[in-house]
Image: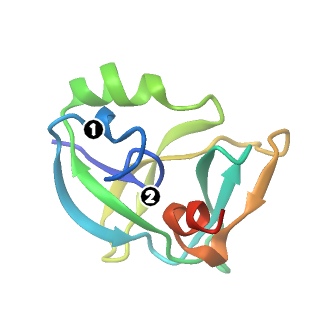
Amino acid sequence: MPRMFLNGTAMRGGELHHLVGDSELVAETTTAPRYRFYAVEGAYPGLVDVGEGGAAIAGEVYEMTYEQLREVLLPSEPAGLELGVIELADGSGSLAMVLRRPHTELPTEDITELGSWRAYRARG
């Protein structure tokens, strides 16, 4: 079963968490320290792999069926994101939504130093 890293509104307690359905939470973790993290239009998060100079970003990993991904989660994602594969802190890989390139046409705020979408939302 594929694993999906979530780092935004579909995490536990988020307004879109219902989109994960009965998928099993398998880990609370971070990405490897190679990503920049953005608030896109102030509404959703976006990861960009920058290799050197990135940071570890907090999130949750779920085991999801392909049907849940295809029929429920992916159709609800904003147009500024695309499905990608990221590296987690333990060196393993996971599916994740990443910022579509080029992303320069979207209004973004670099929130990497906050380390999580929850920290961004909490700052008001």
Q: From where the camera sits, is residue 54 visible?
A: no
Q: Vertical placement of 30 versus 2: above or below?
A: below
The image shows residue 31 at horizontal and vertical percentages of 43, 69
Q: Residues within 10 Å of mark 1 (few under 14, many from 20)?
A: many
Which quadrant holds the N terminus? Answer: top left
The image shows residue 95 at horizontal and vertical percentages of 37, 48
Tell me if 90 is positioned left or right of 52 in this view.
left
The image shows residue 41 at horizontal and vertical percentages of 74, 43
Task: Name, please, the residue furthest toward the front.
Answer: 124
Q: Residue drawn 39% across and 63% down?
A: 59
Secondary structure, mark 2, is strand
Q: Residue drawn 28% across and 57% down?
A: 61
Q: Residues within 10 Å of mark 2 (few under 14, many from 20)?
A: many
Front residue of 91/118: it is 118
- Count numbered badges in the picture: 2
Which quadrant holds the C terminus? Answer: bottom right
Secondary structure, mark 1, is helix
User: Which picture quadrant has residue 52?
Assistant: bottom right
Distance, label 2 to label 1, CA atoms, is 19 Å
Amino acid type of the residue tagged 1 in the rendering: Val
Tell me if 116 is positioned left or right of 69 in this view.
right
Q: Vertical placement of 54 versus 17: above or below?
A: below
Residue at numbered disc 1: 20
Q: Residue drawn 42% across and 41% down?
A: 15
Front residue of 13/100: it is 13
Q: Vertical placement of 42 versus 58: above or below?
A: above
In front: mark 2 or mark 1?
1
Q: From where the camera sits, is residue 42 visible?
A: yes
Residue at numbered disc 2: 86
Amino acid type of the residue tagged 2 in the rendering: Ile
